[in-house]
Amino acid sequence: MTVRRRVVVFASGRGSNFAALVQAQRRGELPVDIAGLLCDKAAAPALALARAAGIEAVALSPRDYASREDFDRAMFARAARLAPDLIVLAGYMRIIAPAVVEAWRGRMINIHPSLLPKYPGLHTHQRAIDAGDAEHGSSVHFVTAELDGGPVIAQAGLPILPGDTAETLAARLLPLEHRLLVATTRLVADGEAALAGDQVVRGGQALAAPLHLDANGNLA
């Protein structure tokens, strides 16, 4: 019998990537158990999405803790109670203390709206436009202590069109982000992709470059 991996999702806002994971699970495209959603904002719309789906939803406030690291330890202790095999950061907008990250090394992935290593951090759509890039995209990577600097597992790209604004570019990218996160979560949860040292391996072989999402939603 196949063991379904347990996934806990962290989010800070509207939860569109979280919703994409839940919908893919319900369609049978993502054979995992989504055990819970954790947020750092009590008003995050993602919490309502989780509760409507019957998924445990927890919000902790950073203001209730003496330091960033104390908050991070509390969040991840709460996640650990749900016994996840994998933590997915899906629009989680906090930098996590290095010691906390290290404890989950190889068991935590993040989606970031750029073709890493380009544009770590914020305002990625506008930065890509300002740089005159022909292409933009999204990346899913293993989380390390370096901000958006962990080994990249997979990416999805799209052209930047004449007249694109940060808003129009973000809107066109979002459906690709959803498909990318679902496909990469499936790959990691299945154990097909893993972190070995500082490299992503697939089927035991180190990737020479990130996988890319094709038109059918597969990673190649």
Image (spheres, rainbow, N blue to C red):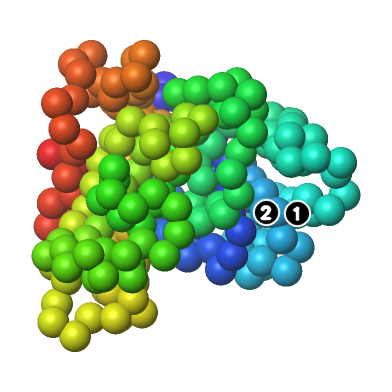
144 vs 56: above or below = above
Q: Are marks 2 and 1 in contact (CB under 8 Å)?
A: yes
| Amino acid on which the number 1 mark rests in the picture | Ala
Image quadrant in which you'd find residue 149: top left
Question: Residues under labels 2 and 1: Cα distance?
Answer: 5 Å
Q: Residue at x 30, y 36 (%)?
A: 152
* The furthest residue to the front: 131
Image quadrant in which you'd find residue 103: top right
Q: Residue at x 74, y 41 (%)?
A: 68
- Quadrant where the C terminus is found in the figure: top left
113 vs 84: above or below = below
Q: Is residue 139 left or right of residue 79?
A: left
Q: Is residue 18 left or right of residue 69?
A: left
- Residue occupied by mark 2: 39
Q: Is residue 77 left or right of residue 17?
A: right
| Amino acid on which the number 2 mark rests in the picture | Cys
Q: Find residue 94 and report its horizontal and vertical position in percent.
A: 60, 49
Residues 31 and 14: in front is 14
40 vs 79: above or below = below
Q: Is residue 177 visible?
A: yes
Q: Find residue 170 and report its horizontal and vertical position in percent.
A: 34, 72
Q: Find residue 217 and report its horizontal and vertical position in percent.
A: 20, 52
Q: Find residue 57 and report its horizontal and vertical position in percent.
A: 70, 53
- Residue occupied by mark 1: 59
Q: Is residue 129 left or right of residue 189?
A: left
Q: Secondary structure at mark 2?
A: strand
